[in-house]
């Protein structure tokens, strides 16, 4: 069969005549690229249902492979191996092994939702990317991602107290992902971000006074104090229990649908 995306086919499975003329038409090289016939038996007939059971993956079956998601994708623009249309195709065919070949890049989705906005079938490809990431984590195909660790800490605090403490979420996230706040401040993105926010060069150009005026002091100070003296809000813990019950209810509903 003729193919369009050669990069997705193993080199050994491609057949191309360097010189081929059919009925007087020269179809040499690229124009006669064919794929060897093959029989696929290692598919999982229930894989589509598995992904549909994850939040975001519910509409994966609707895809008609128009490719609009990939064409609009932020990540595809910088890495053509990042191909949501192709992964959705693999999900619907149950080809898990093929999908796992791209386990190291699927997580790179930046949730810009351009794909979701453009999809004519309301597949919500961004949700499918998230569902795939969670499935790979649950099955042990990839390590727990930093975003999942963040979600876990966020959820834990909601359940425990009915609300989160911003600073505690961030501090525990850094701890769980093995990141040192001091190192990030000294040489990492945190230091760069703060320097940019505060217009660091002002220190040299306009002097200490102007620089200090731009320093966000009260916000970080308040956050630090809240880390030490947890604000007490009456009955918030009961909200946590309500959230827990709601999540359990949603999980039961998803299981029933699957
Ligand atoms: S835009 Fe929607 S229908 Fe088109 S390939 Fe992507 S997911 Fe499928
Ligand atoms: S949400 Fe993810 S898959 Fe969709 S366009 Fe953005 S980067 Fe691509």
Image (spheres, helix red, strand yellow):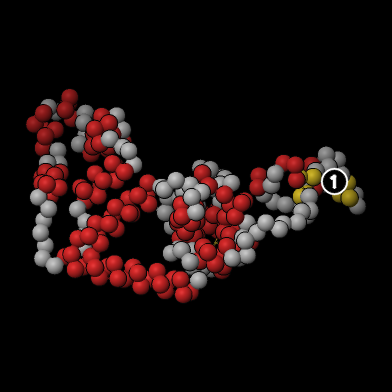
Direction top: furthest residue = 204
Q: Residues within 10 Å of mark 1 (few under 14, many from 20)?
A: few
- Looking at this view, is 64 or 89 the one in front? 89
Residue 67: in sight, yes or no? no
Residue 176 locus on image (x, y percent): 31, 43
The residue to which callout 1 is attached is 26
Tell whether 151 sits left or right of 41: left
Q: State which quarter of the image contains the N terminus.
A: bottom right
Direction right: furthest residue = 23
- Number of marks in the rendered image: 1
Residue 26 locus on image (x, y percent): 85, 46
Residue located at (51% from left, 62% from top): 51
Residue 206: in sight, yes or no? yes
Q: Name the secondary structure under disc 1.
A: strand
Residue 78 locus on image (x, y percent): 51, 42
Residue located at (35% from left, 73% from top): 249
- Looking at this view, is 205 or 62 the one in front? 62
Residue 159 locus on image (x, y percent): 25, 62
Tell whether 108 sits left or right of 225: right
Residue located at (19% from left, 53% from top): 165
Residue located at (54% from left, 54% from top): 84
């Amino acid at each position: 069969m003729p193919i369009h995306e050669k990069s997705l086919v193993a080199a050994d499975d491609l057949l191309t005549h360097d010189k081929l003329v059919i009925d007087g038409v020269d179809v040499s090289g690229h124009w006669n690229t064919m794929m060897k016939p093959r029989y696929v038996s290692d598919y999982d007939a229930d894989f589509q249902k598995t992904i549909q059971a994850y939040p975001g993956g519910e509409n994966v079956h609707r895809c008609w492979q128009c490719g609009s998601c990939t064409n609009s994708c932020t990540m595809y623009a910088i890495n053509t191996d990042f191909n949501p249309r192709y992964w959705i195709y693999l999900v619907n065919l149950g080809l898990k092994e093929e999908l796992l070949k791209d386990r190291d890049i699927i997580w790179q989705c930046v949730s810009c939702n351009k794909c979701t906005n453009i999809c004519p079938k309301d597949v919500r490809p961004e949700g499918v990317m998230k569902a795939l990431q969670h499935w790979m984590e649950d099955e042990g195909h990839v390590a727990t991602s930093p975003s999942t660790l963040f979600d876990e800490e966020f959820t834990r605090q909601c359940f425990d107290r009915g609300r989160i403490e911003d600073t505690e979420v961030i501090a525990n996230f850094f701890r769980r992902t093995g990141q040192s706040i001091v190192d990030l401040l000294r040489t990492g993105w945190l230091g760069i971000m703060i320097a940019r926010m505060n217009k660091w060069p002002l220190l040299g150009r306009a002097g200490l006074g102007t620089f200090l005026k731009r320093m966000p002091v009260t916000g970080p100070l308040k956050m630090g104090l809240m880390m030490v003296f947890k604000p007490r809000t009456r009955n918030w813990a009961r909200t946590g229990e309500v959230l827990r019950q709601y999540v359990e209810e949603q999980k039961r509903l998803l299981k029933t649908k699957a």
